[in-house]
């Protein structure tokens, strides 16, 4: 994929800016937009995403061919790309917390927001990634310190933001366009995700939108669903938010 990498010091939200660019363009957009900080960073479920200077914030456009059968796994693939890029540039035990977070030592290090934009008959996925890279421990607000961490807070040296961005996008391009992971068998990727699964073995409560499901996480299924052992048997959750997390057992 031939991509233009754009850097701006401040963005309201790189996802919002890239979506506007896609909507205003007749040709497919393949740009990657990175910002030094965001004044209105967005997370899932309309939450704000704390985006001070020092973090890595970018959004990449993925024009879709139209024959993809499971676009929803894109967020999991992005999580895998973030882990693998960080593992090679800044080795540590990064974990994927289904469906869209990366954890390090039990706290959130990175979040992913995937949004779809349609222009005429074409659909483009915008994958937005935030990584608490160069944010010092003392810069983490007190009210977030129990749930959020950063590379320096864990004693790690942050990689160069531009190089980290390129590595992640390069891996994700490989999964999406070379391996055709959004239409081909997802199970090899699910295996790599399971090797890094934060939730496996933990007791969770998941809000799916239509119901609340509690149980012990068994795995991420070959299709990318969260598999739980519940009092009623086995449940496979396609999309949802993990509300409560218990200890591993
Ligand atoms: C989450 O934690 O719920 C997802 C957070 C996603 C944050 C990234 S930072 C780059 C891109 N721009 C945004 O406004 N959000 C995403």
Image: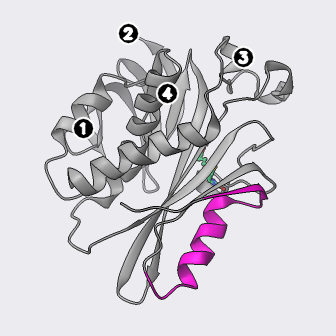
* Place of residue 139 in the rendered image (x, y in percent of width and height, measured from the top left): 85, 27
Dot placed on the residue nearer the N-terminal end, 1 or 4: 4
Locate residue 155: give its quadrant: top right
Q: CA distance from mark 1 to mark 2?
A: 25 Å
Q: Residue at x 42, y 44 (%)?
A: 78
Q: Which residue is mark 3?
A: 153
Q: Residue at x 60, y 51 (%)?
A: 58
Question: Would residue 129 be found to the left or right of residue 65 on screen?
Answer: right
Dot placed on the residue nearer the N-terminal end, 4 or 3: 4
Q: Residue at x 35, y 22 (%)?
A: 200
* Place of residue 132 in the rendered image (x, y in percent of width and height, measured from the top left): 67, 32
Dot placed on the residue nearer the N-terminal end, 4 or 2: 4
Residues tagged 1 and 2 counted as in contact (Cβ below 8 A): no
* Place of residue 193 in the rendered image (x, y in percent of width and height, measured from the top left): 31, 31
Question: Would residue 92 be found to the left or right of residue 173 on screen?
Answer: right
Q: Is mark 2 within 8 Å of ligand 1?
A: no
């Amino acid at each position: 994929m031939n991509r233009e990498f754009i850097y701006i010091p401040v963005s309201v939200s790189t996802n919002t800016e890239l979506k506007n660019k896609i909507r205003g363009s007749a040709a497919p957009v393949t740009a990657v937009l990175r910002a030094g900080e965001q004044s209105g960073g967005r997370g899932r479920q309309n939450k704000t995403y704390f985006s001070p200077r020092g973090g890595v914030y970018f959004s990449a456009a993925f024009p879709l061919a139209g024959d993809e059968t499971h676009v929803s796994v894109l967020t999991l693939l992005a999580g895998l790309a973030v882990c693998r890029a960080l593992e090679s540039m800044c080795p540590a035990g990064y974990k994927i917390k289904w469906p869209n977070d990366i954890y390090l030592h039990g706290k959130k290090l990175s979040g992913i927001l995937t949004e779809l934009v349609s222009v005429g008959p074409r659909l483009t996925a915008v994958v937005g990634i935030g990584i608490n890279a160069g944010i010092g421990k003392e810069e983490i607000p007190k009210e977030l310190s129990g749930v959020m961490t950063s590379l320096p807070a864990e004693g790690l040296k942050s990689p160069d933001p531009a190089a980290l961005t390129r590595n992640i996008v390069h891996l994700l391009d490989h999964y999406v366009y070379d391996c055709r992971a959004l239409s081909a068998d997802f199970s090899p990727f699910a295996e790599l995700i399971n090797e890094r699964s934060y939730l496996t073995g933990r007791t969770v409560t998941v809000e799916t939108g239509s119901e609340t499901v509690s149980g012990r996480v068994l795995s991420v299924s070959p299709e990318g669903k969260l598999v739980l052992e519940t009092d009623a048997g086995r449940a496979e959750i396609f999309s949802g938010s993990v509300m409560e997390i218990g200890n591993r057992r």
